[in-house]
Image (spheres, rainbow, N blue to C red):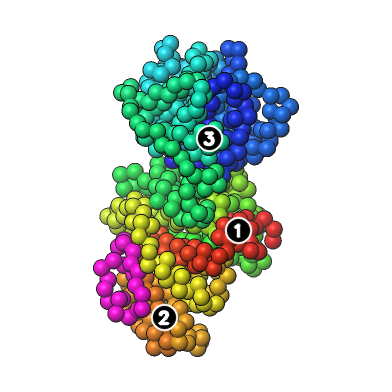
């Protein structure tokens, strides 16, 4: 499901253009790679849309304003079709009767598109959304509402829609399924929006649509129905938040909001790729099984948090696909003259898709004849454009500098890749793959349960906020996770924390363990659990204050630590998606306890586009 775009709609007595643009400005955190509006005037829906941030659209409308009192608007986070003028919304049908803005993904859009093309329809864009405009035109029966209801029956996936039409310009229709949508109720005017910030300036009275519901708006009325036509009675919500808080969905910081968006980011990144226990990436990865069989080595290259996801990737691909994997920090990789051949698969991981060192590594690998697969969160980014193969994460825009939901989505993408390669190359028995594909979808709810109860993490954070130094330890797959936990803490709390493979401590670092120093110990890996417990006892013996993070039901850890936090049980291979959550929260609450600007920590940028 498309994580995020921003949609707005207005019908009233005022000029719609600036109300739509202002609403989109408040939704730009949802997507900012292209934008557009359509305004009804004198029998026509006039559209202005362009690639680039909202300011580009503003320039267009400054030059040639659109007049009219009804319209819709959109700010995009590309999924189907790169950011371009043609792919930006609104989309129209050929007769220019319907105009659509959409947030979500129509999973069966290719089937509907082929069917319409056979009937002679031609398409102007690569998007799934444009299919809806032509479908409405095909199904139009003289009544907008019943036409929309018929079209909805044909569409699979997630969608929040605002629909305008020239035949019934006194109406706007909004439809919701699995993407957020609200209707704002004004005096002689009404609004549609993906989120509250867009309309707060005009009204604080809103209807929140539920899945499978639609709203029909006129200037002075809002009617709610289910998409099969049953009237819906619903109390209006009166919003008391200010705009800034609303942009963060009521969370104090974007980082906390994004931490809480992980259950959805995991579901979205899994969706349409994992069906009935089978992972299918053949629509995204064009490499044939024969070509995949030729790879004898994998290089994973990335920076920062993405590099930590790469370290998990090594274990996943080596254990499932049995191909040797090397993992490199991009700034080192590009100068170490790596051994690259046409049978090397290079995987670059980058949330932004614009990190200079990772891009340089990508280009170097391609030059050396290797095949490059990019895992990125931004459609149309340099990595997405330059890699030979692309596997998108659907985490949605990540605003906070400290990466959280992009990291867990990268892990999901890596599991999907490992499972797909193992199935295509036949390197694991079906039943073993099934065990993993059955556990994967449960992660979303398990993350949710961790997020619902994090009081003890917060308390521990307030304690460590007093310290200037601390350690993280872990073994096996817990080691890359503590590296990530330590990075999160460093970058937003400015505490000097080090993460170590627990077995390595006694080779030197143990000398730094002294009375009262906090140690965060991850013990989720069954195979090395007892070894991990002995390492914990080692640091305890030197006076460390230990927070142990283990699996529900494993009580033996309790005896060895000062404070104990548990995560739901899952396969050892999958625990990194769960065990990182408490560490993200720990960093967040330590940072707030130290009064630091969590979303914009000192000396750091969200995307490092220089070497
Ligand atoms: C993580 O919290 C940091 N923002 C940083 O380490 C980041 O992961 C790194 O700069 C890589 O960014 P990318 O994923 O956009 O390439």
Q: Is residue 430 visible in the rendered structure shown here?
A: no
Question: Is the residue under label 3 in contact with that under label 1 (CB below 8 Å)?
Answer: no
Determine the image quadrant of residue 75.
top right
* Distance (Cα) linking label 1 and label 2: 30 Å
For disc 3, the marked residue is 199
Marks 2, 3: nearer the viewer? 3
**Label 3 residue near ligand 1, CB within 8 Å:** no
For disc 2, the marked residue is 545
* Distance (Cα) linking label 2 and label 3: 49 Å
Question: Is the residue under label 3 in contact with that under label 2 (CB below 8 Å)?
Answer: no
Mark 1: give few (<14), some (14-19) or many (20+) Cα within 10 Å.
Answer: some
Is residue 561 covered in magenta?
A: yes
Badge 3 element: loop
Image coords of residue 416 (percent x, y): 41, 52
For disc 1, the marked residue is 600
Residue range corresponding to the magenta coloring: 550-571
Badge 2 element: strand
Earlier-in-chain disc, 2 versus 3:
3
Quarter of the image with the N terminus in it:
top left
């Amino acid at each position: 499901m498309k994580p995020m775009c921003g949609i707005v709609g207005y019908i009233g007595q005022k000029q719609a253009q600036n109300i739509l643009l202002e609403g989109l400005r408040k939704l730009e955190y949802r997507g900012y790679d292209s934008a557009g509006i359509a305004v009804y005037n004198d029998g026509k829906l006039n559209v202005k849309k362009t690639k680039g941030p909202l300011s580009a659209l503003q320039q267009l409308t400054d030059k040639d304003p659109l007049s009219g009192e009804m319209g819709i608007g959109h700010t995009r986070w590309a999924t189907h079709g790169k950011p371009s003028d043609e792919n930006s919304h609104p989309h129209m049908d050929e007769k220019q009767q319907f105009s659509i803005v959409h947030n979500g993904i129509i999973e069966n859009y290719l089937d509907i598109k082929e069917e319409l093309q056979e009937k002679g329809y031609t398409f102007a864009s690569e998007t799934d959304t444009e299919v809806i405009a032509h479908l409405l035109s095909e199904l139009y029966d003289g009544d907008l509402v019943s036409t929309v209801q018929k079209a909805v029956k044909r569409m699979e996936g997630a969608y929040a829609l605002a629909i305008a039409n020239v035949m019934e310009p006194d109406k706007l229709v909004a439809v919701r399924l699995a993407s957020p949508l609200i209707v704002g109720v004004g005096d002689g005017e009404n609004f549609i929006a993906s989120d509250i910030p867009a309309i707060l300036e005009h009204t604080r009275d809103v209807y929140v649509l539920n899945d499978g519901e639609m709203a029909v708006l006129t200037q002075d009325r809002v009617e709610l129905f289910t998409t099969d036509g049953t009237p819906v009675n619903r109390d209006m919500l009166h919003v008391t938040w200010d705009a800034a808080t609303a942009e963060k969905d009521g969370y104090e910081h974007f980082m906390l909001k994004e931490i809480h968006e992980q259950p959805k980011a995991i579901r979205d990144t899994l969706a349409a790729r994992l069906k009935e226990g089978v992972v299918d990436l053949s629509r995204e990865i064009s490499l044939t099984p024969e070509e995949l069989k030729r790879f004898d080595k994998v290089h994973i290259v990335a920076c920062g948090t993405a590099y930590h996801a790469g370290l998990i990737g090594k274990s996943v691909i080596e254990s499932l696909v049995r191909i040797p994997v090397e993992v490199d920090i991009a700034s080192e990789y590009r100068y170490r003259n790596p051994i690259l051949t046409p049978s090397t698969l290079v995987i670059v991981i980058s949330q932004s898709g614009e990190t200079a060192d990772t891009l340089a590594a990508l280009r170097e690998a391609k030059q050396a004849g290797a095949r490059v697969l990019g895992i990125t969160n931004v459609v149309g980014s340099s990595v997405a454009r330059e890699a030979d193969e692309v596997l998108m994460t659907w985490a949605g825009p990540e605003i906070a500098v400290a990466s959280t939901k992009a990291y867990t989505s990268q892990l999901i993408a890596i599991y999907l890749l490992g499972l797909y390669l193992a199935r295509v190359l036949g390197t694991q028995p079906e039943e073993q793959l099934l065990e993993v594909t059955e556990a994967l979808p449960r992660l979303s709810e398990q993350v949710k349960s961790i997020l619902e109860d994090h009081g003890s993490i917060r308390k521990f954070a307030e304690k460590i906020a007093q310290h200037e130094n601390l350690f993280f330890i872990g073994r096996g797959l817990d080691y890359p996770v503590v590296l990530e936990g330590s990075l999160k803490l460093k970058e937003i709390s400015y505490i000097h924390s080090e993460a170590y493979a627990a077995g390595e401590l006694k080779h030197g670092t143990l000398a730094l363990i002294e009375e009262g120093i906090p140690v965060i110990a991850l013990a989720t890996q069954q195979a090395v659990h007892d070894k991990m417990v002995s390492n914990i006892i080692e640091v305890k013996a030197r006076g460390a204050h230990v927070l142990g993070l283990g699996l529900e039901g494993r009580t033996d850890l309790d005896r060895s630590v000062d404070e104990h936090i548990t995560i739901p049980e899952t396969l050892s291979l999958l625990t990194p998606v769960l065990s990182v959550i408490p560490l993200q929260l720990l960093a967040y609450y330590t940072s707030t306890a130290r009064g630091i600007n969590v979303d914009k920590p000192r000396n750091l940028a969200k995307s490092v586009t220089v070497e």
